[in-house]
Image (cartoon, rainbow, N blue to C red):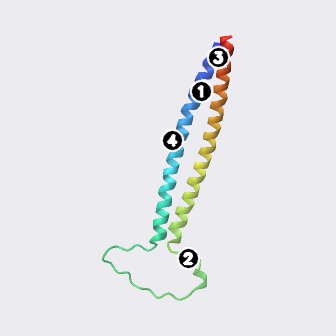
Amino acid sequence: MIQAYEKLCVEKADLESELGEMRALVETHLSRIRSLEQQLRQREANPFPTLPGQEVPFLSLHPNPALSHVLERPGGWPSRGLEAELEAARQDVQRAQHREEHLKAECERLQLELKHLQDSRQQ
C-alpha cells in the first residue's frame, strides 16, 4: 500500500512537470502565432514597402490571363508562406492544448486515486 502511494506521488509529480512543460510549449506557440499574425497584417497593410527617399519606377503591364494568379493580391508569395507557417503553428498549439487537457485529466485521476489510498490507509 505504501509503495502504491509512493508510486502515485512520483507519477503525479512527473505529470505535473510534463503539464508545466506543455503549458510553456503552448505559450511559446501562441507567442509565435501572434508574431506571425502581426507580420501578416503588416505585409497586407503595406504590400510594397519602399525605402525612404527612393522612387519606384513605374512599369507598364499588359494584361496576361496566364499571370492573373500572380496578381491576385499584393505580396502573395510571402503572405502565403506566412499563412502556411501560421496555420502550422495553430495546429501545433491545438495539439499541445489537447495534450494539456489529457495531462490534466490524468493528474486529476491520480489525485483521486491518491486520496482513495490515503483514506483507506487511515482506516
Closest to the camera, between mark 3 and mark 1, is 3
Circle 1 packing at 10 Å, graded few (<14), some (14-19), many (20+), is some
What residue would you read off at disc 2? 70
Residue 94's place in the image compared with 65, above or below, is: above
Quadrant where the N terminus sits is top right
In the image, farthest residue toward the left: 53
What residue would you read off at disc 4? 24
**Image x and y of residue 60, in percent:** 46, 88
Whether pointer 2 and pointer 3 mark residues with C-beta atoms closer than 8 Å, the reply is: no
Which label was assigned to residue 118? Answer: 3
Q: CA distance from mark 2 to mark 3?
A: 68 Å
Disc nearer the start of the sequence (3/1): 1
What residue would you read off at disc 1? 12
Which secondary structure, mark 4?
Answer: helix
Q: Quadrant of residue 16?
A: top right
Q: Quadrant of residue 110?
A: top right
**Image x and y of residue 45, in percent:** 46, 70
Residue 119's place in the image compared with 88, above or below, is: above
Residue kind at label 1, given as amino acid type: Lys
Q: Is residue 65 left or right of residue 74?
A: right
> Which residue is found at the position 54% from the left and 45% from the top?
26
> Which residue is found at the position 52% from the left and 43% from the top?
25
Disc nearer the start of the sequence (4/3): 4
Residue kind at label 2, given as amino acid type: Val
Disc nearer the start of the sequence (2/4): 4
